[in-house]
């Protein structure tokens, strides 16, 4: 039997075992006996996830039993709409450009090193 979380108005969140058939049923608080509703908790990784990735996961969950089928023409039209939404002048802080990766690395003795095209230059 799975463990579900419930929230009592007086005593807060508690966990109880329940059958799969009773997953949506309220449960009595073990301390006061008050009927408490089940709560759903989301992992913090889901809340900090990029919007696009979250939408892709939701789309996959919806399509689990009935996949969305589109033609090549519909696919091209959808891509053109996405490109039109993205069409704007790129400023220095628009966020569209990938960030340049730093060449910084640490040597075996813990010192910083910035490799460059000019090895004769001294880095500070």
Image: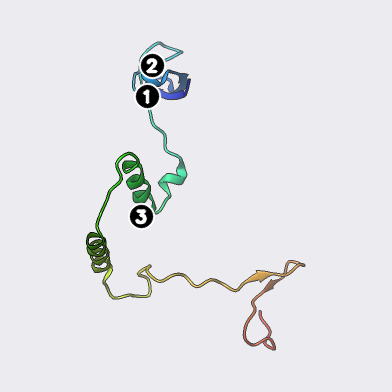
Mark 2 and mark 3 lie on one chain; the one further toward the N terminus is 2
Q: Nearer the viewer, residue 30 or 9?
A: 30
Q: Which residue lies at the image location 37% right of the left edge and 19% below the top edge?
A: 21
Q: In this view, does 35 lie to the left or right of 2?
A: left
Q: How far apart are marks 2 and 3 (CA)?
A: 36 Å
Could you tell me residue 73's position as x and y percent? Answer: 22, 63
Rendered image coloring scheme: rainbow
Query: Of tags 2 and 3, which is closer to the observer?
Result: 3
Left or right for 43, reference 104: left
Q: Marks 3 and 1, Cα distance to the nearest angstrom?
A: 29 Å
| Residue designated by label 3 | 52
Q: Residues within 10 Å of mark 2 (few under 14, many from 20)?
A: many
- The residue pinned by badge 2 equals 27
Q: Do the residues labelled 3 and 1 touch (CB within 8 Å)?
A: no
Instruction: Please tell me whether residue 32 is drawn above or below residue 15 in the rendered image.
Output: above
Which residue lies at the image location 35% right of the left edge and 46% below the top edge?
60
Say if mark 2 contacts mark 1, CB within 8 Å.
yes
Q: Which residue position is annotated with label 1? A: 38
Residue 63 pos. (x, y %): 32, 43
Depth check: 107 or 55 in front?
Answer: 55
- Category of crowding for the residue at label 1, using alpha-carbon neighbours closer than 10 angstroms: few (below 14), some (14–19), many (at least 20): many
Q: Residues within 10 Å of mark 3 (few under 14, many from 20)?
A: few
């Amino acid at each position: 039997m799975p463990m579900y979380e419930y929230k009592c108005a007086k005593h807060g969140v508690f966990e109880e075992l329940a059958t799969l058939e009773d997953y949506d049923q309220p449960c009595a608080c073990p301390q006061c006996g008050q009927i408490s509703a089940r709560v759903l908790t989301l992992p913090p990784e889901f809340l900090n996830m990029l919007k696009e990735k979250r939408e892709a996961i939701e789309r996959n969950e919806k399509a689990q039993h009935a996949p969305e089928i589109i033609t090549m023409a519909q696919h091209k039209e959808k891509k053109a709409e996405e490109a039109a939404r993205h069409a704007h002048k790129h400023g220095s802080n628009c966020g569209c450009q990938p960030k340049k990766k730093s060449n910084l690395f640490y040597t075996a003795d813990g010192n910083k090193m910035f490799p460059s095209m000019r090895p004769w230059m001294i880095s500070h």
